[in-house]
Image: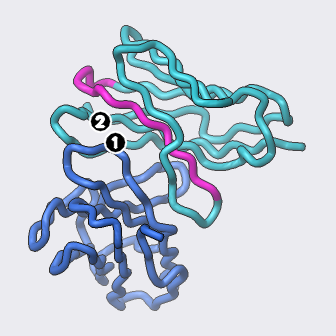
Amino acid sequence: DGGITQSPKYLFRKEGQNVTLSCEQNLNHDAMYWYRQDPGQGLRLIYYSQIVNDFQKGDIAEGYSVSREKKESFPLTVTSAQKNPTAFYLCASIADSGANVLTFGAGSRLTVL
Amino acid sequence: QQQVKQSPQSLIVQKGGIPIINCAYENTAFDYFPWYQQFPGKGPALLIAIRPDVSEKKEGRFTISFNKSAKQFSLHIMDSQPGDSATYFCAASVETSGSRLTFGEGTQLTVNP
């Protein structure tokens, strides 16, 4: 079945540690996105990539980094510079930048102790 | 202004009731208004969407009402069921420019048996 796989589903880390969240899609979608979800704040865009080897900052990029070396993969690193990293992280993709139907993964919940 | 304001933050109804979730926007260039449904521990999924050339769209028990002059749109769920209990997000974008979706804050709906 085609879809987006995020891993790990749950992750616990100590303050000051960098963590990388994996996002893999087999939908052959061009554009991929990372969102952060906090209660009462909706979905806020962290980074997005419309093509391999290119990505843009979203609304809350500070403290995060990404790479897009392969079309199917868009990993997100939460660095120690992110002040409040505990959240639910969602990866999504769209067939091309002209489309509007986002397909989401099941999410990764990061808890920083 | 890119914001989309959503209310209420939470909503509890009895089975068979008609919950209504409202969204308001400022950017008059928005021309695509989807609603996403998210079950606990899962990623959001597209539920229904509307474009401003119509004032209402129905898909099964779900209806979007759109008021272009008031810059508001709402989701109505007819004959609500406990299985409809989820978080609902409205969103908006300028589809013709392939812009990113801007999401509302989300509404946590509980339908009691």
Q: Nearer the viewer, residue A64 or B89?
A: B89
Span of residues in magenta? B26-39
Q: Colour of chain A?
A: blue
Q: Amino acid at mark 1?
A: Thr
Seen at 64% across and 30% down, the residue is: B60
Place of residue B19 in the rendered image (x, y in percent of width and height, measured from the top left):
70, 29
Query: Which chain is home to disc 2?
Result: B
Q: Residues within 10 Å of mark 2 (few under 14, many from 20)?
A: many
Q: Residue B102's mark?
A: 1
Place of residue B89 in the rendered image (x, y in percent of width and height, measured from the top left):
51, 42
Describe residue A9's horizontal placement relative to residue A34 as left or right: right
Residue B25: in magenta span = no
Q: Amino acid at mark 2?
A: Ser
Q: Is residue A55 above or below residue A82?
A: above
Q: Work out which residue is located at the far front of the displayed protein and give it.
A: A1
Q: Is residue A12 above or below residue B94?
A: below
Q: Earlier in the sequence, mark 1 or mark 2?
A: 2
> Which residue in the protein does label 2 denote?
B93
Cα separation between marks 1 and 2: 6 Å
Describe residue B4's horizontal placement relative to residue B31 as left or right: right
